[in-house]
Image (cartoon, rainbow, N blue to C red):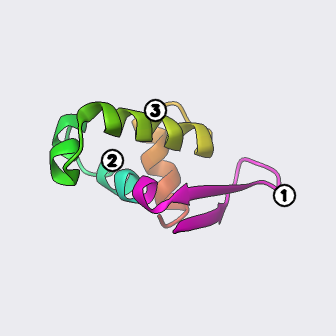
C-alpha cells in the first residue's frame, strides 16, 4: 500500500508517494534513536534502513533528518 501526499515546496501538480514501509521508517525518524536502533525495531539491517531513508529524502526533497521530521510533521505523516 502506498500513500500519496501533496507537498508544500513543490508545484500543485507534484505529489509524493511513500510506501507503507517508508511511512513507518519516517515515523521512526521522529524518535531520538539511531538508524541501528530503528533497524532493530523493524527487524532489518542498518543498510536497509539507510536505503529507505535515502529514498524518503529523495521523494520529499530534503537532505537531513531534521528536515524530514519537519516535513512529516507538516504533512501529518
Q: Kindly identify which residue carries mark 2.
A: 29
Q: Residues within 10 Å of mark 2 (few under 14, many from 20)?
A: some
Identify the residue shown where x is 69% and y is 54%: 8
Which residue matches tag 1? 13
Q: Which residues are magenta?
A: 1-23
Q: Residues within 10 Å of mark 1 (few under 14, many from 20)?
A: few
Badge 3, how many Cα within 10 Å: few under 14, some, many 20+? few
**Sequence-wise first label, 1 or 2:** 1
The residue located at (42%, 41%) in the rendering is 52
**Disc with the residue nearer the chain's start (3 vs 2):** 2
Q: CA distance from mark 1 to mark 2?
A: 27 Å
Q: CA distance from mark 1 to mark 3?
A: 24 Å
Task: State the residue position of label 3.
Answer: 64
In the figure, is residue 27 to the left or right of 55?
left
Q: Foreground residue, 61 or 21?
A: 21
Answer with left or right where residue 23 lies relative to residue 43.
Answer: right
Amino acid at each position: 500500500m502506498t500513500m500519496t501526499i501533496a507537498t508544500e515546496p513543490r508545484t500543485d501538480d507534484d505529489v509524493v508517494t511513500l510506501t507503507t514501509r517508508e511511512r513507518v521508517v519516517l515515523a521512526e525518524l521522529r524518535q531520538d534513536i539511531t538508524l541501528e536502533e530503528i533497524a532493530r525495531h523493524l527487524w532489518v539491517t542498518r543498510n536497509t534502513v539507510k536505503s529507505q531513508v535515502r529514498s524518503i529524502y529523495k521523494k520529499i526533497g530534503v537532505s537531513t533528518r531534521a528536515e524530514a521530521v519537519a516535513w512529516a510533521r507538516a504533512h501529518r505523516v
